Image (cartoon, helix red, strand yellow):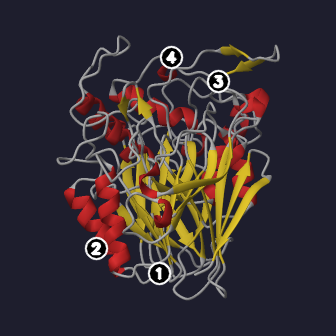
Amino acid sequence: MTLDRRDLLRAGLLAGGALALPAGVAAPAFARARPAITHGVQAGEVTGGGALVWTRADRPSRMLVDYGTRPDFRGHRTVRGPWLSPGTDLTGKVALRGLPDGRRIHYRVRLDDGRVTSAPETGSFATAPRRGQDVRFVWGGDLAGQGWGINEDFGGYRIFNAMADVNPDFFLCSGDWVYADGPLAETVALPDGTVWKNVLIDEKAKVAETLAEYRGQFRYNLMDANLRAFNARVPIVYQWDDHEVTNNWYPGEILDDARYTEKNVDVLTARARRAIDEYLPIDLDKPLYRKVSYGPLLDVFVLDMRSYKNKNTPNLETDGRGLLGAEQKRWLTRELRRSKATWKVIANDLPVGLIVPDGTAQEGVGNTDSGLPLGREREIAEVLRDAYRNDVTGIVFLTADVHYTAAHYYDPAKASFKDFAPFWEFVAGPLNAGTFGPNTLDGTFGPTQEFFKAGPRANASPAEGAQFFGEVEIDSRSKAFTVRLRDLDNKVLYTKTLTA
């Protein structure tokens, strides 16, 4: 049976009335519910010539991406992307290739279920410059940790508005992007008598063990409107740490934790990695450690300090495995030597000189011995020595992990191990989690804490304001590298400018 315009008018369709069709008659295509994008759009792995664009659908459908250099999409190109299916939790990515250097690329994502097409959702990102242009980016880590999730009365994840206000070219995520081991309660009493109210979903009611529960960790954070708006404007360079799987994990670990039915960390890690691959614009067919080049001024060396980590011990070994693994360490020393960029940022999800205990063991690089390098310090010493002996300059470490913000200067004149050039390490976080610190410094590499700011107490909530992110600005003329440590309200707490 077919319907003409008069039939549709009688049924009220064209006049905006209720749908009233004879039994057995299908609604016309335009009257069917359209597919919808459920958790926004985001871009990542942006280089001079390419990027990955991500989205998630509410039903099986084809991902389509239009892109170009004009916000009105005149003269745009279209990439026909993957079919989004339940096998990937309805998520998908499209690779954009052949992009011009140093330009803002505008994109819009649509979904086509074979019958109707969704409303588009737009985003943009800046590609890396080929010639000298100013570079600005932000970094930080730790989201929805220690019981502090999305609180709409607080304004949600407000810090992403502050980060967006500095207009960064990209966001360097320093890990703990989700807290898969951190269940949330509906309410938490605060010291001032008020109540923190968490938005909840089923997957945040317990520790994540199944693939569905790990997927839910990422869906939860993307419920926040501030984060979705930030993702549409600022591409991500993603790095993981421990809480994407479980606290302080290492390969081969068997958990002694009554909350978990699945005790094998390798099984949990595989499920977490799949969820990461599905929910972030990242290519996990390649190693997580990688170099992201952002023009002649900047190379970012993203480390993976989890996949090759040895067991948590007192960290005083004189031989054996460490933190990076032999292959990653060779890659890092080789690529640092090859880099022609003015500045070489090493994104280390575990700080170099801070002692991070795991019970009676040590979780990170440092230990309680300030003498010559032992344990995981040996790998860092080898990297620093190789860079020094091969005249590699411009190394700066950026990290998060410890839930406060700080600036550390490492000086061989004050160190037990002296075969390295002085360098800086800057710490920024948490983005929306409990605050802690400051941690004790290990003296092996001669660190001095020039600045720190922490919360008023252990596990202070975001409502008490001690949430932090870092900003880096590289001036194309002077090549100066300026770091600003900022708080939740975008107040600059500390500034350091390094000369090239």
The residue pinned by badge 2 equals: 334
Tag 1: amino acid: Ala
In x, y percent, where is residue 325? 23, 53
Residue at screen point 38% across, 47% down: 365
The answer to whether the residue labelled 2 contacts the one labelled 3, judged by CB atoms less than 8 Å apart, is no
Tag 3: amino acid: Val
Left-right relation of 410 to 228:
left
Relative to the observer, which residue lies in front, 318 or 344?
A: 318
Task: Give the alpha-carbon distance from disc 3 to disc 4, as whole Å.
Answer: 11 Å
In x, y percent, where is residue 224? 65, 37
Tag 2: amino acid: Arg
Question: Nearer the N terminus, badge 2 or badge 1?
Answer: 2
Give SS at disc 3. loop
Question: Nearer the N terminus, badge 4 or badge 1?
Answer: 4
The residue pinned by badge 3 equals: 199
Please tell me the numbered disc located at residue 408. none
- Label 1: few (<14), some or many (≥20) within 10 Å? some
Give SS at disc 2. helix
Give SS at disc 4. loop
